[in-house]
Image: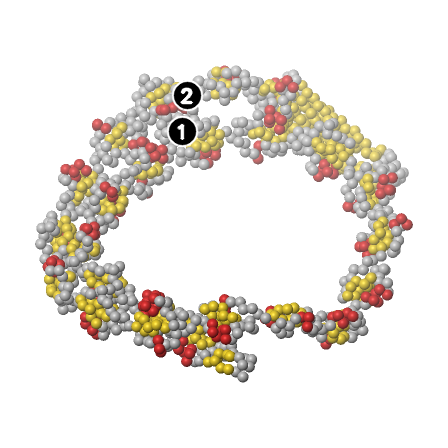
Amino acid sequence: MAALCLCATPVLAGGSQEETQSQSFEFPLSPGAATLNFDRFDDQDGARILQKVTLSVEGEIRAMVTAENDSVLPAPDFALNLVGFMTIDFRDLSTFVSFDEAFLTDGTVGPTDGVPGSGRDFWDFGLVSDTGSEMDMTDTGLDVFVGDGTIAAEVTGAGGFSLSGSTDATIVTTMFMGAGTVDITYQFRLTPTGACCFEDGSCEQLIADQCATAGGDYQGDGTLCETAACPQPTGACCLPDGSCVEATQVECEGVAAMSGALDPAMVFAGDGGGVYQGDGTTCATVTCPQPGACCFPDGSCAAAMFVSGSDCDRMGGVYQGADTACDAVSCPLPSGACCLEDGSCQDLTQDDCATAGGLYQGDDTSCATIKCPQPAGACCFDDGSCSELTEERCMDFAGSFQGDGTMCDTADCPQPTGACCFADGSCQELTQDDCVTAGGLFQGNGTACDTAACPQPQGACCFEDGSCDFLTESDCDAAGGVYQGNDILCDAADCPQPTGACCLADGSCVEQTQDDCQGGGGAYQGDGTMCDTVTCPQPQGACCLADGSCIVATEDDCTAGGGTYQGDDSACDGVDCPQPEGACCLADGSCIVATEDDCTAGGGVYQGDDVACAGVDCRQPEGACCFDDGSCVSTTEADCAASGGTYRGDDTMCDDVDCTRITGACCFPDGTCLDTTQASCIDLGGSYQGNGTTCIKADCPQPEGACCFPDGSCGVVTATACDDAGGTYQGDDVLCPGVDCPEPLAACCFPDGSCMDLTQTECNDTGGAYQGDGTVCSDINCPQPEGACCFPDGSCVFSDAEACFAAGGVFQGEDTNCATVDCPEPEGACCLDDGSCVVLTELDCVLAAGVYQGDGIACDDVECPQPEGVCCFADGSCQSLTQTACTDAGGDYQGDGTTCDTVECPQPEGACCLPDGSCIAATAADCDAAGGLYQGDDSMCDAVDCPQPEGACCLPDGSCLAATAEGCDAAGGVYQGDGTLCDEVDCPQPEGACCLADGSCIIATAAGCVDEGGVYAGDDTTCDTVPCDGPPGACCLDDGTCLEGTEPDCDAAGGVFQGSGTSCVTADCPQPPGACCFEDGSCQERTEEECVTAGGVFQGDLTRCDDDACPGACCFDDGTCEDLPRGACEAGGGEYWGFGTECATTTCPSTGACCIPPGDMFRCDEKIVELT
């Protein structure tokens, strides 16, 4: 069995290198042989020169051996002897390896026991072996080692065994094998190479002989193709614009960097490179094709820039072919819809449309989709109005078309009639013009006097209560008023006002009109009332009484009651009446001086006004008092303490407390505990822990003593702590100085790696390393003897055998070191610059300018980086990739070593929307240069919607907006042309009915109607359908508000029309009356303004002074209160506190027995009585 390994070694001194082939062999003995075939040395066509060949061998013979003593005598010197040899022949090289080794027993082999294969006479030697190595080399006659094919290395071997120490013995051998490794090392040097340039401009890295044989030009030893400037052939190059230059093929086709041969300005982005005409051609002998004519959609023609016509295609043109000229081609002109003056449409060119006097609608428009404007004429409507419209529009509005080109100025449209109302209320049926001429108010076309409600004249109407209303004479008479005449206003009429009693603020009374009364701050008592029959209320105020209370009373009543009057209109809520004070006994038995309210609020007992604490004996609180015998009495805290009891708190009861004996935990010096009373604990010499404590929760201090710990140390702790620590307690109060604690055993490691459990002293005495208290040998890994350990990567560490084996290393033996051990260097894949891969050591890889891939890595397992070059993609982008990556990505590879800076990748095209709304195929750059909007790579004009140009669009309502021609048509407008602005066009305005100030109606535009002072009724309205109700005026409604409108609208709203041309600003609409409440509770029905002027509170329009009006707080003798009107309050025997007061904020005085000193005068019910 053989395995071949090819290894390369680093460069040796003098520049030599080595290449080693290694093969292993194994064959059975004896004898045995093997043939190993080694590759001859490859001189790589002279690039390598063989200097020396070395043959090396490492051989081994081995077997599994057992032996048995067949003699009746014991064999203490029983031994096995192994001998043999191995030869290797490799052409002129040969080696001889000998083997000789003895294997001893332990001297216990006994005499034969007659039983083969076992017993004391049997000895198993196991695997026995011996190794050896040799080498041979030559540096002459090396030609036989060079070339193709292989050379055989013939290996032969033989061996045998013998026993000594016995006169008769039996040997049994199995697996008797010869094995080893043969290395063939070729030492060589490299022949120098250099760049070799060929006529076609290419270059190869060759030795000088190879270059000469191939017909190349050798550039010298050590030169490189990357830096060699090999001359390139040139030829004529036809450029995209038709010009010609002489350049290399690479320069012409735009792949390599530009040299002086080409002007960079001649390179046309997006149209590829030139067309190379062949090596040796010249521009003088070559005719390059020229760019041809390009026809555009508008019929114009221009010469293309490029022979291919790609620029023509990108601009939406039609290329006529190379070498064509515009003067030799006929480009078709575009056509479009042409709107003629009569409204018809024809598809014509723009010039033909202009000749026919039409309006051209744009290239590629069609009469099938264009709506041409139609001629207009006069259109008469039923209301007599006229508008100039197209016939179709006239029919849509139910008009009568007078013919194309007719004018409203000359058309005689018949006028309708209607009711005409005059100022005196009369009515005639006339046309609107005749009505206005006669000074009437036209009621609308088709109206009749029978149904027309002509407004009647009005005037001031005075009523008995002095009020005035603007009414017709009949309405005034019906309301019981006195009519003052037509058109006389209430402001000019002097209606007589009624009088009545007026109560003034000081309680006096005068008879005046309501306005005079309220103007003087009085309270008007009603029309026709007399002072003789009216009782005016007197002013009141807060009155502080001697007991600190407060009542509201007149000043006289307050003084008579011994109070202090606080002033008119003052309220008890706003005064602070002084309160009397006296002694106050508190709940805790103390006494303070306070008012009765403060005393009560503090939970005290008030002892009376002006009573001092010095004269008061306040009752002290009592509570349960417990004694040691468990008895209980109710007493004060002071008395309880004086009797030696325990006071359980104020207001506690003996029936509610537990006076049982109080105990607590008692700790004794020995750490024990007893639950007992404090006194008993002290008597027993214990330490009382407090009332309610228990031994279960008490932490009584425990006695301490010496404790021997597992580590042999000693400490003074409690018995519990000692036990918890695993120690041995030596007794209470025993100290460590008097205790001899045993020393613990622990693991002890020895230099040979063995371990024993010893005390620290024993370990130190025997030269061991103590591992620490508590350690045991079963848990300790003692350090093992160390030596050199070689790893597969050629590195070496100092380690023990086990660790070396575990790490995958080969242990070199005890006490070996890395300085003296030669660990073999590993090999791995090495990636070279050209992307190839060889297996080398890391150093050899670096010397070969390669990239080492790692130890043990095979070339089949790595992907060496390949050279990169320009990769052009369909989108015009450029990346530097390997050829494989470029192809996989769908790109076009431009060659190794090319760069994106020097290669022009063809750019993609897409749809380009031009400003005129058309679309062409172009590159993004060409589209941008043409002012277009690029729609994206590979987009198609058929699939994009280019924005169309906009212009002014006149809508049917006369307004104008910016829109496309299509959008304008969809909106029913008339497109004014691309680029037109609304500010620059005059759109025709719509018309409608216009009601003039005199009630007549005309057809006009909205602006024209305003200019005439009329009211525009809306676009397309007609006077027949719009009622013009005459001039508006002010309209007074029942609630006193005013609206401006026509008289019919006013009548419909139930108002009183103030006349045409009147305004709410100047109209004096009568205000509705309502209930007006005064502070004294009286009520009058007045207008809101009159009520406020008189100092009252207005209750709302049309409210009445009924029994429920003007409520206020009503206090009764029993101190209760209700919110009632004054009449209801007084009828119920209550005291009315005034309008606006509320029971929620009013304190009614309460009544009770009142003791009056004999002979004093006291006022009761406004009568003075003398009491006895």
Q: Tell me the quarter of the picture where residue 185 sits.
A: top right
Which residue is at the front of the view, 264 or 176? 264
Residue that badge 1 annotates: 904
Residue 1038 image point, x, y percent: 27, 68
Which residue is at the front of the view, 1080 or 714? 1080
Which residue is at the front of the view, 112 or 246? 246
1116 lies above or below 8: below
Among numbered discs 1 and 2, the one appearing first in the sequence: 2
Q: Tell me the quarter of the picture where residue 286 sits.
A: top left
**Quick one: quadrant of the N terminus?**
top right
- The residue at the point 48 percent across, 30 percent down is 868
Q: Are marks 1 and 2 in contact (CB under 8 Å)?
A: no
Q: Amino acid at mark 2?
A: Ser
Which residue is at the front of the view, 427 or 1008? 427
145 lies above or below 455: above
Residue that badge 2 annotates: 259
Q: Is residue 157 visible?
A: no
Q: Amino acid at mark 1?
A: Glu
The total number of labels drawn is 2
305 lies above or below 605: above
- Of all residues, the one furthest to the right in this rendering is 738
**770 to the left or right of 1084:** right
Decide: few, some or many residues near mark 1? Use Cα within 10 Å; few <14, some 14-19, many ≥20.
many
- Of all residues, the one furthest to the front in this rendering is 1159
